[in-house]
Amino acid sequence: MNRLYRSRTDNKMTGLCGGIADWLGLNATLVRLLVVIAAFCSFGTTMLLYFIVSLVIPKAPYGPNPYNQSYTTY
């Protein structure tokens, strides 16, 4: 099962929309657009929920560092 994390690479403010897009398999721009439309339709309640959820959901763990490879020379 895929866990929901805030994105470290696809972030504009907190990485929440990028993380939701990765989790759902959607485009991050589409998710951001839906959040903006929902914010206007809900008179700002969506933005309050956005920041609360951003505090609750953790950032994605760091992946393997491609520059930290140990090569054995003989």
Image (cartoon, grey):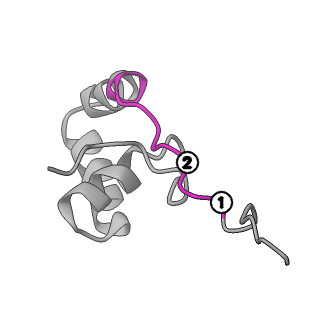
Amino acid of disc 1: Asn
**Residue type at numbered disc 2:** Tyr
* Dot 1 and dot 2 residues touching (CB under 8 Å): yes
Q: Residues within 10 Å of mark 1 (few under 14, many from 20)?
A: few
Residue at the spot x=30%, y=71% of the render?
A: 27
Q: Position of residue 13 (x, y in %)?
A: 54, 44
- Give the side of residue 29 with respect to residue 70, left or right: left
Report the label total.
2
Mark 2, residue position? 62
Q: Position of residue 22 (x, y in %)?
A: 30, 60
**Residue placed at 57% from the left, 58% from the top?**
64
Instruction: Residue at the far front: name it.
Output: 74
What is the span of residues highlighted in magenta in the rendered image?
53-65
The residue shown at (54%, 50%) is: 8
* Quadrant hosting residue 49: top left
Mark 2 neighbour class, 10 Å CA radius: few under 14, some 14 to 19, many 20 or more: few
Question: Foreground residue, 24 or 32?
Answer: 24
Q: Which mark is residue 65?
A: 1
Secondary structure of the residue carrying numbered label 1: loop
